[in-house]
Amino acid sequence: MRFRAQLAALAARFKQELVFYRALLAHPDTPWLAKALLWLALGYLVLPFDLIPDFIPVIGQIDELVILPLLVYLALKVTPIAVRQSCRAQI
């Protein structure tokens, strides 16, 4: 039962983060570069082609674990703190 509660908490946190990034994309003061990086991360996640093909063992699957967080991190770095706080307050 403890594992189920942890999984539910993780799912709730994931949902909050999705709402945050949606609010960040919709905010008028979010820089265009941050919006472009977030859209690029979403596109990289959804589209079927990768920089490193998935049929290459290990690194083919790990590239998503490196590239996606890097794009999101860079988007958050170029976004002003006030905009991030405003979006967090909307959640």
Image: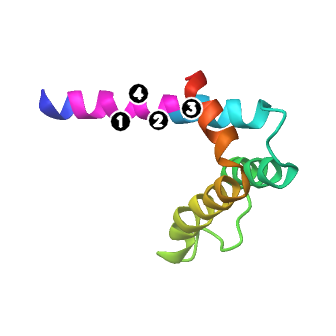
Label 2 secondary element = helix
Contact check, label 2 and label 4, Cβ < 8 Å: yes
- Residue 49 in the image: above or below residue 19: below
- Is 13 magenta? The answer is yes
Query: On the picture, is 50 further left or further right than 9?
Result: right
Query: Mark 4, residues whose alpha carbon is within 10 Å: few (<14), some, or many (≥20)?
Result: few
Distance, label 2 to label 4, CA atoms, is: 5 Å
Contact check, label 1 and label 2, Cβ < 8 Å: yes
Numbered disc in front, either 4 or 3 = 3
Percent x, y for residue 45? Answer: 66, 51
Contact check, label 2 and label 3, Cβ < 8 Å: no
Distance, label 2 to label 3, CA atoms, is: 14 Å
Residue linked to disc 3: 88
Residue linked to disc 2: 14
Residue at the image position 71 percent from the left and 72 percent from the top: 51
Residue at the image position 22 percent from the left and 27 percent from the top: 5
Distance, label 1 to label 2, CA atoms, is: 6 Å
